[in-house]
Image (cartoon, helix red, strand yellow):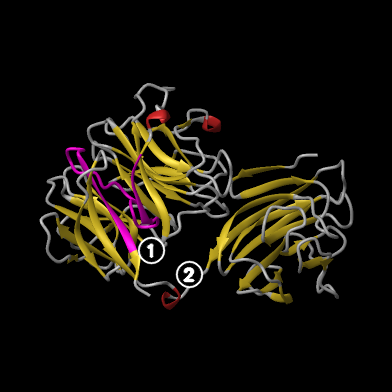
Amino acid sequence: MAGSARHEGGTFTLKGTLDIWGASDGFHYVYQPLVGDGQIVARVIGVENTNEHAKAGVMIRESLAPDAKHATMVVTPVDGVQFLRRYETGGLTTPTNPRISKGVLPYWVKLVRKGNEFSGSESIDGTTWTPTGTDTVNLSSRVYIGIVASSHQKMIAGTSTLDHIAVTPQTPPRSARPRVQSHVTLINFDGTNKHVIYSGARHFEAPNWSPDGKYLVLNSEGKLWRLRIAGGEPEVIPMGSVTRVNNDHGISPNGKELVVSENGGPLYILPIAGGEARRITEERPSYYHGWSPDGKRLAYVAKKPGETHYDIYSVSVAGGAAQRLTMHPGHEDGPDYSPDGKWIYFNSDRAGGPGTSDIWRVPADGAGEGDARAERVTSDDYVDWFPHPSPDDKWLIFLSYEKGTEGHPANKDVVLRRMPLPGAEPGAKAATEKTVELVKLFGGQGTINVASWSPDGRRFAYVSYSILD
């Protein structure tokens, strides 16, 4: 029997069959990719007693194969709290013995990965934690992390409910990242006349082209920088009390303001010349990607408390309540407005899950109930990210990874592609057969995370990289 998952108000309701046991598992899994170290916490509210071995909890798993290696923390209706792991692909499952607690619901579970060491903990309040077990399981760096439910029955789906779900990836130390040289490049919309305006050891990302056409805004080392098209050295833009921004930033259509995403935090707007910033959003994390052509709204992605995925939102530049535009459990990113302001283009893995991503669009006022108004734009084997419509309403450029790439990693062989922008009317056919490769480069994260078209739509800017050590 197929399982299911439903999310409402921060609570996930999962229906799953079979079991996490033996040499092969069956269960329902709501997950997201994780690279490197991290942890997941969840409160298990209820586990239907279809069997004393029915389970609900949190899992880190090497793959989605039934016999994959994993580490798991679960609560059962009768059989207590269990810390489970499978050391080898196709090997038997090993439980914690003895079990520490019977886990009277609601009950909290936590699973932490540090290298190949996995630690499970349990709590009655989510504050004071008791270790359940620690063990070594040799998993690859790229894994899946999420919540699970099983019934220990083949033909009966058991219902489990969980909330307060929090996934925390751990950022690797800067010394673990390779040093790169950045090449800030301008290119014509047809792929001709490629011109490098800056090369240096500073790690620059995500160019925005100013509305007056005179300079680019980029980020590096948590700061914003201004780089003139005519050349010269980059100049720091002061940001007041905002001290660390990421590569999700933009310039207002009138050229008077900047929007920045504080690293892991909210959105801020500040004067184009720099200065004190004012906070726009309350959500953490939230990441800017598009400014509406009329200058009134910002499009961004955010992950609400208790959710494991990012959706598309918009908010007034004056602040206030955000409007949720998509409601799909897939991962959404990179929303950018069409020049007429009618559509928001973005990338999503909603059609194929992790390791896939296509370009989609929704009306600027939202995808509607069940995301019924969402339209798929690309559907080939590439993994497509960060779509940007041209200001002249003719083209769509985007970043493409090779098939199977999860997320938008840095330091990869990627392609910048261009296709005609679909018509403004709903259901307009995307002329994907006219998609062309403009340039192949070494990059990915940081190359074109945000809009980088010149004001006349004849050129755009991007960043490529070369490894220094």
Crowding at mark 1 (Cα within 10 Å: few <14, some 14-19, many 20+): some
Task: Find residue 275 and report its image quarter.
Answer: bottom left
Q: Secondary structure at mark 1?
A: loop
Relative to 318, is 42 on the left or the right?
right
Q: Residue at x 72, y 53 (%)?
A: 65
Please tell me which of labels 1 and 2 falls first in the chain. Answer: 2
Q: Residue at x 42, y 78 (%)?
A: 175
Magenta segment: does it hold 438?
yes
Task: Find residue 428 and report its image quarter.
Answer: top left
Percent coordinates x, y for residue 97 in the rendering:
85, 74
Image quadrant holding the N terminus, namely top right
Crowding at mark 2 (Cα within 10 Å: few <14, some 14-19, many 20+): few
Magenta segment: does it hold 439?
yes
Label 1 amino acid?
Asn
Percent coordinates x, y for residue 5 in the rendering:
68, 43
What is the span of residues highlighted in magenta in the rendered image?
437-465
Percent coordinates x, y for residue 31 in the rendering:
62, 53
Q: Nearer the viewer, residue 234 or 125?
A: 234
The numbered dot on residue 263 is 1
Q: Which residue is mark 2?
A: 171
The numbered dot on residue 220 is none
Q: Is residue 116 above or below residue 46?
A: below
Q: CA distance from mark 1 to mark 2?
A: 12 Å
Q: Nearer the viewer, residue 72 or 402?
A: 402
Q: Residue at x 54, y 50 (%)?
A: 309
Percent coordinates x, y for residue 390 in the rendering:
27, 37
Label 2 amino acid?
Thr
Q: Is residue 29 above or below residue 138?
A: above
